[in-house]
Amino acid sequence: METELTRIFDALPVIAWIALPDGHADFINRCWCDLAGRGTEEISGQGWMALVHPDDLPAMLASWHAMVASGKPGELRVRMRHGDGNHHWHLFRVGPLKNASGHVTRWYGMDTGTGGRQQPAESSPASELDALLTIDAMPLPVAITAPSGEVRRVNRHALHYFGRSFEQLKRSKASEVVHPEDLPYIISAQSKAYETGSTYNVQSRHRRSDGVYRWFNVVGMPLRDAQGHISCWMHLLIDIDDQRRPEEALRTTERKLRSIIHTIPALVWSARIDGSVEFFNQHYLDYVGLSAEQVADWGWKAAVHPDDLDGLADSWQLIMASQAPGETEARLRRFDGEYRWFLFRVNPLRNEAGHIIKWYGISIDIDDRKRTEEQLRRSEAFLAEGQRISMTGSFSWCLDDNEVMLSDELYRIFGFDHDTTVTLDRIAGRIHPDDATLHADKKSDAREVGSDHDYEIRLRMPDGSVKHVHVVSHCAQGRDGQREYIGAIQDVTQRRASEETLGALRSELARMAKINSLGALTASIAHEVNQPLSGVITNASTCLRMLAADPPNIEGAIETARRAIRDGHRASDVITRVRALFSRKSSNTERVNLNDATKEVIALSQSTLKASRVTLKTDFCQDIPPVTGDRVQLQQVILNLLLNASEAMNGVDDRPREILVRTEVDEDARVRLTVQDSGVGFESEGLGKMFETFYTTKSSGMGIGLSISQSIIERHQGTLRAQANNGPGATFWFAIPRAGSDMRTTTSDSDATAPLLRAARVAGSL
Ligand code: ADP
């Protein structure tokens, strides 16, 4: 209603207002708005009531509505709240504007005496009658109750708001019209007021006819009779719902936020800019088992492990100085006394000017993670230590992308720097040139076949030294289907060196033993032959002496010549027996499975073959028939052939050192064993002499192995042969008849040849 009048009213330096005939405030001038520090909308309607001092409101409303009811001018004395929050006394003069027919069309009010904090002269209290007459005209719910609290009257506005008749309202329970949550509060305020006779003022929610609860400022005041006794109570319900809602919403949000912070399963806290803690959530307090008072400011330190306190305090100071988010770790004591590791993470909160006004922190339990990390670290340390002590490193090689990973120990074995990226080429560069073919073969085998590997190879280190390593690996399928070789490599250089020393010692020992045994054999023969020979010499000398006597003793000479002949025969017998030794039949005859006998020999000679880096392959006939013979002697032959084959490859470095052992049944139905090597082989003239006793082409050879072997095989009615291969190397084989149904029995040696036979066996077995 922008009229000339309102513009004038706005310009007035005092509070002025215009109300409708029913008392509803229609226009509030600028001076009032400025004084109250509120907008026009907030004060218009019934909003101004919130500015009136609650103690003055009932009386003022009573006077005002009495005025409206009578249509006569009057005065209103009230304390109004100003923008500074204080109440100031005002005296309003109010007058009606009537139309031609005498009806009031507007009310005008103006402040005629702002009295500051001082109360103007006491106005006479409104009488009960006045009040009763005027409450119906009031534009807000009003109830009159007896001093006991029993409802006497309610105005029309109240009936309309609650949607009930007066009788219904009287019968209604308080809980039907008041919000259950507010009921205890309002009841206690009223009972206290009834008891003391003083005004009460509460905020509560009341149920509208449509079921909606609205917030009201309920003001109750006693009305007294002429004697000053309370005759009744007037209860005014001033609707403040529109103001309360946003506040309520804010409070609800805050409440929710608080309950979230308290129930969040983490330890949450906030600190002031000086670092002292201002807030801990419930979870934190429950965890450390301390009260909010106990942990306030710096009290929280009590829950930190004494050993971690200084570190935590230092880190906290550093984070604050950096003015940036940060984190640190420390142990916190749980309510039950157990310390657990926590990660403290903190973020600053800044104001609009960018200054830090608070710190917000969260403490996360990382104890289990720490424990796992520690266990992992320890098991890694164990593994590394185990690898170092056993000089074994592990590796993985992905066949698809050729990515190679080595353990620390393997870096050491290969002599790679830790920051080197290891590639297949780098590894190949470390392989000894003589083993390059073996390495290449194993690599292509891995790619094409994917079989498990177990072999030894040499490395040549940058300083020229040679290392022997033992490689064991297995092809596995990775998670994403990639083929990967996982394996271990052991540095066996020291072991190899000791084995070589041991091997050299062993062969030296064998040579000495051979010589000794041969010596023993020779001594035995000499001893056996010497006796009859000296008999021959003695007898022959005696015979000569007898013939040279005068007269010659013919009879004696004949006798001594006979003795000489007898001794000569005796010597000849010894020689025959020694020869018979080499052509003697098997002494321990049994059924022998040549496959099994050969496997035992291979097992025995494995370490010798390995030391010579010889690869042995076998091709056994599965259903080989048994042979009859001396198992030990046959094994001596096999061992001799195997060692000869290995020795024939000693100088071979340009090709694999390979031996193939095969068993089969030959065209004559005999059982045949073949030993084929890739060694130096022999010339055709060698073939003729090889089986002769004492023929050898080796510096430390004895030249009796093949001759003894041949005599053993012949004794088994078999044949031993040699032939040069088409390619490099030689092939030796023997064939003996398969066992018949008859088993030959053991032939016992004569007592006289027993020592000779024993010596010959020892010599032959070496
Ligand atoms: P030794 O081994 O002590 O020399 P042997 O009687 O076992 O005595 O062998 C005699 C010779 O036969 C050897 O010195 C060697 O010249 C030759 N010989 C034996 N086996 C082989 C072989 N596999 N390849 C080439 N030559 C061989």
Image (tube, helix red, strand yellow):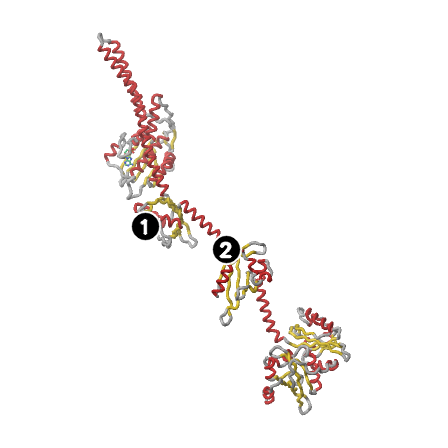
In this view, the residue in front, 699 or 224, is 224
Residue identified by numbered label 2 = 369
Residue identified by numbered label 1 = 429
Q: Classify residue 699 as left or right of residue 103.
A: left
Q: Secondary structure at mark 2?
A: helix
Quick one: which residue is furthest to the top in this view? 551
In this view, the residue in front, 322 or 711, is 322
Task: Judge depth for marks 2 and 1 and give the one in front.
Answer: 2
Q: Of label 2 and label 1, which has the lower sequence position?
A: 2
Name the image quarter holding residue 611: top left
Mark 1 C-beta closer than 8 Å to ligand 1: no
In this view, the residue in front, 82 or 453, is 82
Residue under the point 46% across and 49% down: 379
The quarter of the image holding the N terminus is bottom right
Mark 2 C-beta closer than 8 Å to ligand 1: no
Question: The residue under label 1 is which amino acid type?
Answer: Gly
Give the Cα separation between the discs numbered 2 and 1.
Answer: 42 Å
Q: Position of residue 703 (x, y in %)?
A: 28, 31
The quarter of the image holding the C terminus is top left
Name the image quarter holding residue 518: top left
**Residue 440 in sight:** no
Count neighbours of disc 1 (C-alpha within 10 A) and say few if under 14, some if 14 to 19, many if 20 or more: some
